[in-house]
Image (cartoon, rainbow, N blue to C red):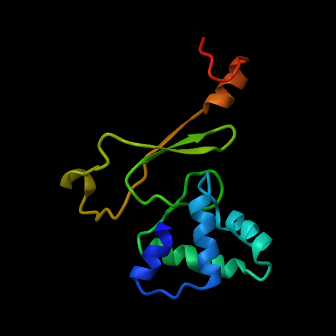
Amino acid sequence: MRLLEVLRQHRVKLTPQRYLICSLLEGAKHHPTAEALYEEARKIMPTMSLKTVYATLHELAELGAIRPLTLGSGGTRFDPDPSPHAHLVCRKCGSITDVPIDNPFVHLSLDVGQGFSVEGYEIIFRGLCASCRAEEDGLPEGEEQ
């Protein structure tokens, strides 16, 4: 697992809790919140604490192994893919999908940036996923008008 390798490279002790959180995060189909990971972890390890989940997620984020995201869909979500990419966020169901972007590097000119030191950015496209769009249009999913 990639996340465990990052922890090993930084000589972070691989506790059973960290191992479980990393495996759940890498196996997640969506960008989970800390609370969602906590609920999943407690099914396997009932003694897991929410504090441990948060501490592990923040540790992984500080190492650059994951990206915390604020997408306006309630709470911070955690993306196990730290590489440059954009997100599609459905305004109806809240689904989040990773999408590649042609030019992952955005630069502000000095006059526009006003000396601001950019440390990161997020590209978010908002709209309707195929399923919600089909539902609103009254069409079977995947069928265009």
Residue 130: where, in percent of width, then height?
A: 62, 29
Tell me what residue is drawn at x 64 percent, y 82 percent: 16
Tell me what residue is drawn at x 67 percent, y 81 percent: 51
Tell me what residue is drawn at x 60 percent, y 59 percent: 27
Residue 89: where, in percent of width, then height?
A: 57, 42
- Res. 35 image quadrant: bottom right
Tell me what residue is drawn at x 68 percent, y 30 percent: 132
The answer to whether residue 77 shows anywhere in this view is no
Residue 59: where, in percent of width, then height?
A: 50, 78
Q: Residue furthest front?
A: 1
Residue 54: where, in percent of width, then height?
A: 62, 76
> Looking at the image, is 92 positioned above or below residue 111?
above
> Looking at the image, is 4 positioned above or below residue 14?
above
> Looking at the image, is 128 positioned above or below residue 16?
above
Give the left or right position of residue 48, taking residue 130 as reference.
right
Give the left or right position of residue 4, taking residue 64 as reference.
right
Q: Residue furthest top?
A: 145
Give the left or right position of residue 81, taking residue 44 as reference.
left
Q: Quadrant of the C terminus?
A: top right
- Please name whichever residue, 47 or 130, is drawn nearer the observer in this view of the structure: 47
The answer to whether residue 59 shows anywhere in this view is yes
> Looking at the image, is 63 positioned above or below residue 88?
below
Exactly how many numbered labels are in the figure? Answer: 0
- Res. 129 image quadrant: top right
